[in-house]
Image (cartoon, rainbow, N blue to C red):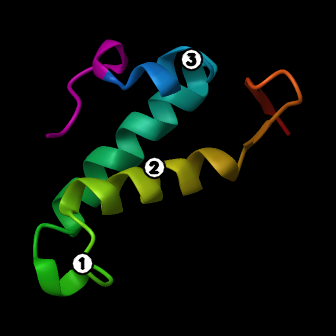
């Protein structure tokens, strides 16, 4: 289920992550969704969606960090 726009992202992303990071998340998720379509490309028993969310969060973490306030901020 790739995301067409950032407005479709999960609430946990839209409510706590800056807009630029949301764009990073969306692009990384959509790319991973395509890349991990084949079950053999994924680790263990995780679903395609789980793998894509992990990749998306990893991409966000490269430029943002979670603050004490629970929101994500640029490094």
How dense is the environment of label 2, judged by Cα within 10 Å: few (below 14), some, or many (20 and up)? many
Q: Picture coordinates of residue 10 (x, y %)?
A: 37, 25
Residue 7 relative to residue 15: left or right: left
In the drawing, does residue 40 fall left or right of residue 6? left
Instruction: Point out which mark residue 53 bears.
Output: none
Q: Quadrant of residue 39?
A: bottom left
Give coordinates of residue 43: x percent, y percent.
33, 83
The secondary structure type at the circle numbered 3 is: helix
Q: Could you tell me residue 22's position as x and y percent?
A: 50, 27
Q: Quadrant of the N terminus?
A: top left
Report how far apart the C-alphas of labels 3 and 1 lie in the structure.
32 Å
Span colored in magenta: 1-8
Residue in the image at 72% along x and 44% along y? 63
| Residue, disc 3 | 19
On screen, residue 20 above or below 59: above
Name the one closer to the observer, 41 or 27.
41
Marks 2/1: CA–CA distance: 18 Å
Viewer-nearest of discs 2 and 1: 1
Question: Which mark sits nearer the N-terminus, 3 or 2?
Answer: 3
For discs 3 and 1, the disc positioned in front in the rendered view = 1
Q: Secondary structure at mark 2?
A: helix
* Residue on which disc 1 sits: 45
Name the side, left or right, on which 46 lies relative to 24. left
Q: Dot 2 corresponds to which residue? A: 56
Q: Earlier in the sequence, mark 3 or mark 1?
A: 3
Distance of label 3 from label 2 (alpha carbons):
14 Å
Within 10 Å of the Cα at label 3, are there few (<14), some (14-19), or many (20+) other Cα atoms?
Answer: few
Residue in the image at 58% along x and 30% along y: 21
Residue 72 within the segment the image draws in magenta? no
């Amino acid at each position: 289920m790739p995301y067409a726009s950032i407005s479709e992202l999960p609430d946990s992303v839209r409510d706590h992550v800056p807009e630029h990071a949301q764009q990073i998340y969306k692009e990384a998720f959509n790319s991973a969704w395509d890349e991990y379509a084949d079950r053999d490309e994924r680790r263990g028993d995780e679903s395609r969606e789980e793998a894509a969310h992990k990749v998306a969060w990893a991409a966000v973490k490269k430029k943002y960090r979670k603050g004490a306030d629970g929101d994500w901020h640029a490094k």
